[in-house]
Image (tube, rainbow, N blue to C red):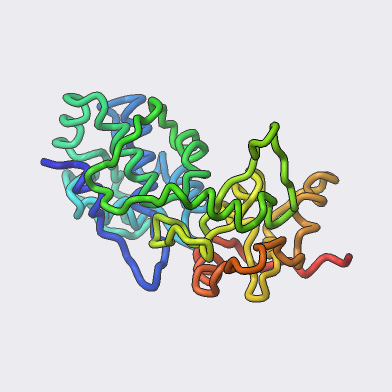
Amino acid sequence: MDWLERIAKLRQWTKGGTRAPHKPLLLLYALGRFQEDADGGLRYTAVEQDLQQLLTEYGPPHKTTPAYPFHHLVSDGVWEVRTDRGPGSPGSGIRDLRGTGATGQLAPDLRAALRREPDLLGRIARLLLDLHFPPSLHGELCEAVGLDLEPAEAEQLPAVRRQRDRRMRQLVLTAYEYRCAFCGYDGRIGAVPVGLEAAHVRWWAFGGPDEIDNGLCLCALHHKLFDKGVLGVGYDQRILVSQRFVGHSPAAREHVTALAGRPLIGPQPGSRPPAAAHRDWHTRQVFHGEPRPATAA
């Protein structure tokens, strides 16, 4: 059985590019727990709060519940649920899962494969990360679910048929003249830019192309905040700052809240700014809450 192919084909609700990473987040959490205790099950009432936090931090902006993947992941053949009454999930209702002592676990065949192939867990985890989340979030996501992964070798996983364009970073940084589009940071060590990254507006994992009009040159801080939904780009190419962001220090005000309403810096003439379709996707699927009013100059 090709577990990578099966993981790559998880059935998820999709419509108009909507993010629904419920199952991938549950699987990453289960893999982290498997590393800790290969035989332990995940009782819903014991892990519900952890799973809800993951969905809040890394899921879609709209309200959602961990009961959905806990029940529905069974149909993908990688997960099983048992209750106090025996095998089988009682349904996707929160009360059903809580009241029946529902306990989930990776499917027996998958657990056996993970024991036989020591590197399979890492390959599955990296596949889930690559297919559903931007690279800027991979490290902290692994920490959040308790995954300890060995450094990945440069490989093209067979389940990922779409190749990234390695020229993307250079094209985007050149278009923005090696300056962060949000704050103007342009640090270098000698002739080498440092702390500058090419951010996808519409995530590569969700069909975002490796093209300049889907990219922003951002410093490492603003790239992370952009992918976390703290920052966004409005229809008028001005910076959005989420009302949900809280920061009282002078640094937080200067580097985040003061950006509200500022125009993007760049790109240079002849290069395309972020396309409306990609900006709209980010605003709907990543940006959290409502934007703050523009900060007075």
Residue, far right: 297
Q: Is residue 83 above or below residue 110?
A: below
| Residue pictured at 36% horizontal, 54% vertical | 67
Residue 58 in sight in this render: yes
Q: Position of residue 234 (x, y in %)?
A: 64, 71
Closest to the observer: 145 or 239? Answer: 239
Q: Position of residue 45 (x, y in %)?
A: 40, 44
Closest to the observer: 111 or 210? Answer: 210
Q: Is residue 234 above or below residue 86?
A: below
Label total for image: 0
Residue, far left: 1
Query: Which of the 4 image quadrants contains residue 13?
Result: bottom left
Q: Quadrant for the C terminus, please.
A: bottom right
Q: Position of residue 208 (x, y in %)?
A: 43, 61
| Residue pictured at 31% horizontal, 59% vertical | 92
Q: Quadrant for the N terminus, please.
A: top left
Closest to the observer: 265 or 57? Answer: 265
The answer to whether residue 18 is left or right of residue 194 is left
The answer to whether residue 18 is left or right of residue 296 is left
Q: Position of residue 34 (x, y in %)?
A: 31, 30
Residue 97 in sight in this render: no
| Residue pictured at 28% horizontal, 49% vertical | 160
The answer to whether residue 137 is left or right of residue 237 is left
